[in-house]
Image: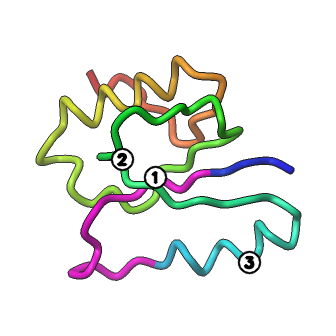
Amino acid sequence: MPQVVFLSTDNLEAFFVYDELLIPYFNELRWSVTTLSWHEKNVDWNQFDYVVVRSTWDYQHHADTFAEVLESIDKSSATLCTPSMGMN
């Protein structure tokens, strides 16, 4: 079963987020979906097959740290479905 993670953020109360609407469609295809904040520390990105950048609404306030997270995903075996394309 492919493992997908939706990259999100910590506090979404002030935002409209529709990520959860996609999960049933992935589940129908027998794909497992997890939602994870990009602020999480020490994530083993190798445990996922795909990382999809979804609701990382505060990344611009921490651009360097966000770029580091994308770089660590790029270096893992996971496929970053929204390539970092030179965020550094």
Query: What residue is disc 3 on?
Result: 24
Using the image, determine if residue 6 lies above or below residue 46.
below
Q: Look at the numbered disc 1 and give the secondary structure of its residue.
A: strand
- Whole-percent x, y for residue 5 in the image: 58, 51
Magenta segment's dominant SS is loop
Residue displayed at 49% across by 29% down = 73
- Mark 3–mark 2 Cα distance, whole angstroms, equals 22 Å
Q: What amino acid type is highlighted by mark number 2?
A: Trp
Q: Residues within 10 Å of mark 2 (few under 14, many from 20)?
A: many
- Whole-percent x, y for residue 82 in the image: 52, 42
Using the image, determine if residue 87 lies above or below residue 53.
above
Query: What residue is disc 2 on?
Result: 38
- 11 in magenta: yes
Q: What amino acid type is highlighted by mark number 3?
A: Pro
- Mark 1–mark 3 Cα distance, whole angstroms, equals 17 Å
- 55 in magenta: no
Query: What residue is disc 1 on?
Result: 7
Q: In the rendered structure, which segment of residues is drawn in magenta?
A: 5-17
Q: Look at the numbered disc 3 and give the secondary structure of its residue.
A: helix
In the figure, is residue 43 to the left or right of 86?
Answer: right
Q: Look at the numbered disc 2 and give the secondary structure of its residue.
A: loop
Please name whichever residue, 33 or 70, is drawn nearer the observer in this view of the structure: 33
Q: What amino acid type is highlighted by mark number 1?
A: Leu
